[in-house]
Image: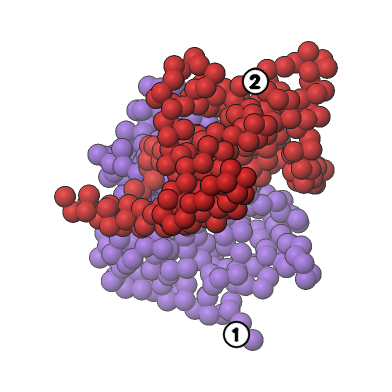
Chain colours: A purple, B red
Amino acid sequence: MSSLPVISSQNLGLTFQTGDGSVQALSDITLDIQKGEFISLIGPSGCGKTTLLRVIADLEKPTAGSITVNNTTPEEARLNGAYGYVFQQAALLPWRTIAQNVALPLEIMGLSKEEKSSRIAKNLELVNLGGFEKKFPWQLSGGMQQRASIARALAVEPDMLLMDEPFGALDEIVRDHLNAELLKLWAQTKKTIVFVTHSIPEAVYLSTRIVVMSPRPGRIHEIIDCDLGNDRPLEIRESSEFLRIAHQVRDGLREGHSYD
Amino acid sequence: MTSTGNYLTNRLFPVMTILAAIVVLWYGVAVALNAPVLRDFEKRAGESTSGMEFLFKTWNMPKPTTPTPHQVASALWKGTVGVKLTSNRSLIYHSWVTLSATLLGFAMGTALGVVIAISIVHVPALDKSLLPWIITSQTVPILAVAPMIIVLLAAIGVTGLLPKALISTYLSFFPVAVGMVKGLRSPDVLHLDLMRTYSANAAQVLWKLRIPSSVPFFFASIKVAIAASLIGAIVGELPTGAVAGIGSKLLAGSYYSQTIDIFAALIAGSICAILLVTLVDVTGRMVQARMGARS
């Protein structure tokens, strides 16, 4: 029925060698992600959700199993500019203005001046930061900085966005707002999004599928479909369907978590 | 108005207080050190003065052990405003000779230091092999090395500005290399990961991330380096009996016991150092303001 998955992992494992022995960060991860999906990775800290995202981005190398991104190795996909990565912190360069920060990946790609300025303008507009081009990062609030970093990831025009708790450091109100913005963006651009979070409402509100992970070793506990449709106003979070899925995620997290 | 008032009370007043204390102390030391010589001189001449008259005499000797501030000030005045710039007695001329060697040596030292730092950051083997030698190079006393460099270079026909500048280079590359290694390594892992997601190559990471991150370290390093360059240039003028430069004035002063001239040359050297360090400081502030630093 569907074409090849954009991300496909088979029995993926990753073991870190540390000073006092080895730590198994990921174990037996088998997961297919289809084009255009919005996948959330959720789980307690130490469950390997960020590590999995970093493996997809070729920031870590797996030590077992296999993974393909766009039907190639993660490294090749990275070299082809397959994804935009949004970190937990905005990670803007403090000596560059907002426009220059968005320009950073475009300079590395070697785009023409016209192409650069049109992409900067378009993507800053998309995250509602038009008019802030000449400001330096410290002149912006935390939420605005994170929006600028999303604009920077989008400016690469990747098919895929990898987001590592991008709104984790923001307050509830800003977070709600950015969640709604992100959904709109996803609907507009049809990108595949892999989103790491530890907030159940955030995962349910945004995702088409939720991957519940459990720690020690980091593994997939359960994959929950989250079929709330494409039109998701913020009020949907009070609907019974939303609460049912949230409950299911919470149960999954509880089962997967051992307190010993 | 308030800001000028604040400036006066916060900055100028403490500095001037210390300066006044130094001047008073200086006159006191001058009396203590010059008095024995003066007494000896008067005994042989069969004269005898006492009280205030004796005091004034200790402060106005032609070749005192310790010249007094007003004698040094007057020598400085004569050496700058009182003579033509081209004159051999012009302190401005001699300062310029030393400054030109300083600036050339500083430029070469900074370039060398930056190149060494970039190599060390990019080639892990150099970190272990080169850095110990760089540190060792600075444990060799420059006063011992300087004459050798000057003589060796003269033997192959290199004289004048370049040998002095090379001694400045020798002293100034070190703080730049050490500071820049730290500066080029200062970007955090997050930003390095970010560059990796863009598949940036080493040169792009260097230009777009490492070098901009190292700017505060760079200016802190060259502030030390430029002061060291000046010392290097003066030291380079000493062993050869150079004909011009602050070092040659110091040397000539000591040959002829012209203590006042020695002090005037010393002060001229300090003024050069203050000017150079201030120049670096102001440039650093301007560059960092342009790079979005909060004022």
Q: Is residue B253 left or right of residue B71?
A: right
**Residue sitting nearer the eye, A196 or A143:** A143
Rendered residue at 36%/33% (across/down) = A120
Mark 1 residue type: Tyr
Q: Quadrant of residue B112?
A: top right
Rendered residue at 32%/67% (across/down) = A172
Same subunit: marks 2 and 1:
no
Q: How many marks?
A: 2
Vertically, is A155 above or below B155?
below
**Residue sitting nearer the eye, B80 or A11:** B80
Q: Residue B83 at x, y = what percent?
A: 44, 20
Residue behind mark 2: B243
| Labels 2, 1: front one | 2
Mark 2 residue type: Val
Question: Which label was assigned to residue A259?
Answer: 1
Q: Residue B50 at x, y = what percent?
A: 47, 55
Q: Residue A250 at x, y = what percent?
A: 47, 76
Considering the numbered disc 1 on the image, is that residue within a helix, a strand or a loop? loop
**Residue sitting nearer the eye, B285 or B197:** B285
**Residue sitting nearer the eye, A139 or A149:** A139
